[in-house]
Each structure stands twice: as structure tokens, then as C-alpha cells.
Image: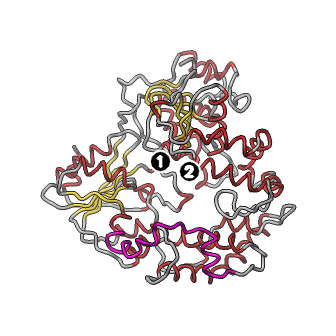
Amino acid sequence: MHIVSLAASGGSLKVEAGAGTGKTSTLVDIARALKARRGTYIAFNRAIADEARRRFPQNVRSSTAHALAFRAVGHYYKARLDQRLTPWVVSEALHLPRTAFNLDPAFQAQLLLGFITRFCQSAERAIGLRHAPAQELLRAVKPERGVLERSVMRDRARALGRELLPQANSLWAALIDPRGRLPITHDVYLKLWALERPHIPGDFILFDEAQDANPIMLELVRNQQHAQHIWVGDTFQSIYQWRGAVNAMAAIATEHTAPLTQSFRFGEAVAGLANAILKSIAGAEGTLRGTPTIDSRIARLERPRAILSRTNLGVIGQVLDCLQDNRKPMVAGGVRELLRLLESAEKLMHGVPVVSGDLAGFRDWESLVEYSESELGRDLQPLVKMVDEYGARLLIKRIEPLEGLPESRADLIVSTAHKSKGLEWDSVLLDADFKGHDEEADPAELTARANLLYVAATRGMRTLDISLCEPACAAIGVAGESLPLATPEARQASQATGGQATPPQGARGATAAAVDALLGQG
């Protein structure tokens, strides 16, 4: 294999591995080809590292970056890892006063934790305003009633960030104090380890899921100048920018670059649609190819195995629909995240301010409703509608019993696109809440939208239903004759509508004849 030969040459290598293209098997082949040398494989999470240990030869040590950091530094803080670093713990430890913006001390602490999170993800050696949690600061300075101009809001947010910066540095000093008592997070000891410019043993480093690396990990590997660097990832599966990730596949320069474009997960129809999504939303040129012998289709499904949504609110909506239909849904990754969101909404409805989580900074339900009507808060409108219609307590009671339901006993799998990454099902339905091309969105936002929908669209192995997903329907028009559709009638419908399938009627269904013809029946 050409990729294995490039790895054996000793030069740095970047492998662009598309969805389902046999990335892990290729990495194992590389490790075997380099059996006379010692290597370190760095995985994105522990489950992947454990699987790698079972598959890689003995010359390769498999680990996560956090495991390497724990052995070197983190074990000194072991007793402080068992506790939760909450805003209330921080506000008490730092004796936080009210700021010029009259913020609750616990909410101030949440903002300070935002500084720490972004600093730990960065390659910088000192905390600065660049690490301020921008969106949270904007929410913190919004008026209790009414809406300010965006430029005014940004000026106020910058002023608050400058006011909080000294406290952020004080919090960092307290966290890294070996004699301190504050709980710490795993990212704290990883940052400490990286600041020491550690030596990672081995003649080569295999860095997996490089598209999701954050700057500190990128810098950490780059500093290992004694070792050959082999980066593996998929530029178009970079979907964690919101938590500090940078697409290392685009950021690094290597002596060799090699693609893996043949997907063994699905056929040509799904691969063609995935490429079309990238083109239509972000203008990117995807090169994914399906396996001709796999009969995958773009078609309407009566009973999909999985439904993928963009947001947690989309997941809640699909779960409620499923329960209403007397079916048992399993939520990928569990329901705790959904319950925390609804519990925060319930607090606001009782006039209790929320200081952490997605609804941090709101003082009551009325303030959230008003914010949802502004440009910055439009994403909260589905939550407002849902809670006003059903009530937060009823929603919690319906969702709580789903905790721990195994996939084997579920009638349907429901997941966010983020949590679906790395998973696959025979049949997948894409929800209506994905975002497509928008002339007012900046290129980075369009790339994020395209990548997320690309990830979701490549989870289906046999049948993919896009009838609810307007951006995916629109992508068919961009693909033109290059996209294998389900039927000749589907091709005619695409040409008749210019590829712009009629948007779904209602939140959960599409009844337009054009979409019916375009998708056929699965």
C-alpha cells in the first residue's frame, strides 16, 4: 500500500481519511510495517485507545494524551480529581465580590472557569483576554429587559472580560498549587504537563482524529522533534470548534500527504450526497467514494433505526414524538445532558437564576423568552415553545425513565450529530434542525455547518432519509448528474425543482410531492 510505503520512508505524513475508509486498519498496517521501531499512538478517548491496544503490535504503545499527562503530572492531583469544580466552590474559594455589572458571584465564577477552559485548550503560556468566553460574556452583559445594539454588547463584554482577567489568573494559581484544595479538571494537569515541554518516547507518533486536536495538543506533538509524526484524520469531520478544537489536518505541513477516499461503509449514493453537502454549504470539494457493491439509497423511511439532530432540543423533540407513538427511544450518550437543560429551564420558571450550563446567565424564564426573540438567542426558541407547551416538569418525567436503556431493547436510536461521530446504523433519518448555506454567515460558520451535516449523513450504511433536512435536499441540486439517486423519477424531480426540495411542512414531516418524488420510498 502506498500509504504504508510513505510511512516507512521516515518522513512526516498526513493521512486524510474519509468517513468509513478503513482508517484503523491502515494505522495497524503502518504499525506493523514499522515493527523494528518503537511508536506511540495517541487516541482521542480511552475507548479508542483500549481498542487500539488489542489491535496494534507490541512495538506501539497506545494511550490518550490525558493518560500520558496523568502518569507524569496528574497523579500528584489525584485526590482533587474526585471532586467537582463548580461555580459555587470557586466563588467561595476566591471570595468573589459583585462586579461593576452586578453579577452574582457564582455566575462570575462560571465565567472564570470559561477563561480556564480556553486557556487549557490553547498553546499560550499565560492567560489573557483572548481566552475570555465570548458568548458567555455577551449573555452576562445583556440588559435585564430590552435589547442593545450588537456593537454596544460587544464593548460591554470586552469591558467585563478585562475586569475578570485578574481573577482568572488568581483562579489558575489556586488550581495548580500543589498544596491547594480546589478540585481540578483533567485538562488542568494536561496543560501543566504540556507547559513543561515533555518528551514523548518513541521513534514515531501516530496521532489519530487530528481534525479534532486543540492547539495545546497540536503544539505538544510538534515539539517532539525526535520522532516521526504521522497525523490521521478527516478535514470534513472537524466538528468540535466550539470546545477549542482546530483542524490540525489543515494547520500542519508534512513531507508527505496521502488520501483514503474509498468508503467501505456505504455505496455511491451516500458518498455523493456527502460530497454535495460540503459543496452546497461551504463550497468545499469532497472526494469521498462509495463502494459500488453496497446498495445504499437516498430514500424515505417509515421506520429508521436512528434519527440524528443538530441540537439537544431536536433530540428532545424526536424523543417526545417516539414516546407519543408508544415506542422506546434510546438516546446516544444518555439523557443526563437533556435533563440538565430541562432542569435549568424549570429553575428559571421558578425565578431561580442559572449559573452553569447552556442557560447560564438568565435570571428568570421571562428574561430567557425575551432573549430568544433577539438575533443572538434564536436557537433557544424551540426550547421556549416546548416548555411553554408541555412544561419542564412533564418533559423531565417523560425523559428520566430512558436512562440506561440498552440499544438492543430500543425501537429507535436518537442522537445529536456530535454524539453520532464514530457510530453507524443501517438506516438513518436526518432531522429538520440542521443549518445550510447562508449568505450572511462567515466562512468558518459555513464550514462548521457543512462538516456537521457531512458527519450525520455518513452514519447511514444502507438507507439515508433526508426528507426533513432542507440543506441535504438542497445539496442534490448542487450535485447534478454526479449524484446517484434512488430512481429515474427522483432525477426528474430534482431537475424540475432545481434541486431545491420543498421545505418540510411542519416540524416533523415533509408532504410536498416534489420531495416524495425526489426520495422515493424506503
- Residue annotated with mark 2: 447
Left or right: residue 289 compared with residue 273: left
Q: Secondary structure at mark 2?
A: helix
Toward which corner of the image does residue 312 lie, by quadrant? Answer: top right
Residue at 47% over, 34% down = 407
Residue 352 location in percent, x, y?
77, 61
Report if the CB atoms under discs 1 and 2 are less than 8 Å apart.
no
Quarter occupied by residue 363: bottom right
Relative placement, left or right, of 169 versus 145 is left
The residue positioned 33% from the left and 61% from the top of the image is 254
Magenta stretch, main secondary structure class? helix
| Dot 1 or dot 2, earlier in sequence | 1
- Left or right for 219, reference 350: left
Which quadrant of the structure image shows residue 222?
Answer: bottom left
Tell me the kind of residue under disc 1: Phe
Measuring from the top left, give residue 158's x and y in whole percent.
Answer: 70, 74
> What residue sits 66% from the left and 82% below the top?
95
The magenta stretch is 69-96
Residue at 63% over, 40% down: 399
Residue at image mark 1: 236
Q: Residue furthest right?
A: 146
- Indicate the amino acid at tag 2: Thr
> Is residue 49 shown above or below 199?
above
